[in-house]
């Protein structure tokens, strides 16, 4: 057997690893999306063009929406900008065939916001970071 070496991955090599798991996953649970990964990213800008809120999300492989980042500048927290970003992303994902959304958030972030938007907690990671909780949440998209 040839020797093996553990080395750091170079940035241009990441896609090789991604392709290995994507190919394997597709062989075990065939993708239902024609395009396996669809970015659904939006932002809200003020009159000067400054981004004051944004959302990054990914609809992947089996009609699943992963909400990665939803960020709103603190001075705009009471302007419902989070809702103005989350709802269109969910609606766009539903139009594209999404059936489930999921995300994670910390206890000092937006758990209650997501609960108000129909998400439910399905897992909690304690002490992540120390003395805090990380919540894993999901929502069935109608």
Image (tube, rainbow, N blue to C red):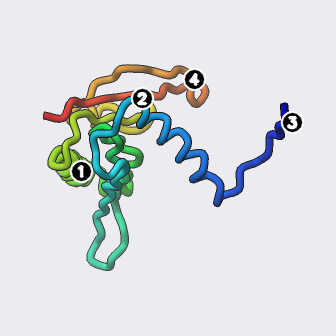
Q: Mark 2 highlights which residue?
A: 28
- Looking at marks 2 and 4 on the same chain, the residue that comes earlier in the sequence is marked by 2
Check contact, mark 2 vs mark 4: CB within 8 A.
no
Mark 1 or 2: in front is: 2
Question: Residue 126, percent across and down?
Answer: 53, 20
- Looking at marks 1 and 2 on the same chain, the residue that comes earlier in the sequence is marked by 2
Q: Mark 1 highlights which residue?
A: 89
Mark 2 or 4: in front is: 2
- Looking at marks 4 and 3 on the same chain, the residue that comes earlier in the sequence is marked by 3
* Residue 139: quadrant of the picture: top left
55 vs 81, nearest the viewer: 55
Q: Mark 3 highlights which residue?
A: 3
Question: Residue 72, percent across and down?
Answer: 35, 54
Question: Residue 137, percent across and down?
Answer: 34, 28
Mark 1 or 3: in front is: 3
* Residue 29: quadrant of the picture: top left
Q: Compute the Cα span from label 2 to label 4.
A: 34 Å
Dot 3: what SS? Answer: loop
At 31% from the left and 41% from the top, the residue drawn is: 65
At 56% from the left and 28% from the top, the residue drawn is: 128
Q: Quadrant of the C terminus?
A: top left
């Amino acid at each position: 057997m040839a020797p093996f070496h553990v080395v750091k991955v170079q940035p241009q090599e990441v896609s090789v690893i991604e392709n290995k798991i994507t190919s394997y996953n597709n062989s075990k649970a065939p993708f239902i999306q024609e395009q396996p990964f669809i970015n659904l990213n939006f932002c809200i800008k003020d009159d000067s063009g400054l981004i004051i809120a944004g959302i990054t999300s990914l609809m992947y492989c089996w009609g699943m929406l992963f909400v990665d980042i939803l960020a709103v500048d603190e001075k705009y927290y009471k302007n419902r900008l989070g809702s103005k970003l989350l709802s269109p992303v969910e609606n766009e994902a539903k139009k594209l065939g999404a059936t489930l959304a999921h995300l994670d958030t910390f206890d000092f972030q937006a758990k209650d916001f997501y609960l108000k938007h129909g998400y439910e907690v399905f897992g909690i990671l304690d002490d992540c970071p120390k003395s805090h909780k990380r919540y894993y949440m999901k929502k069935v998209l109608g």
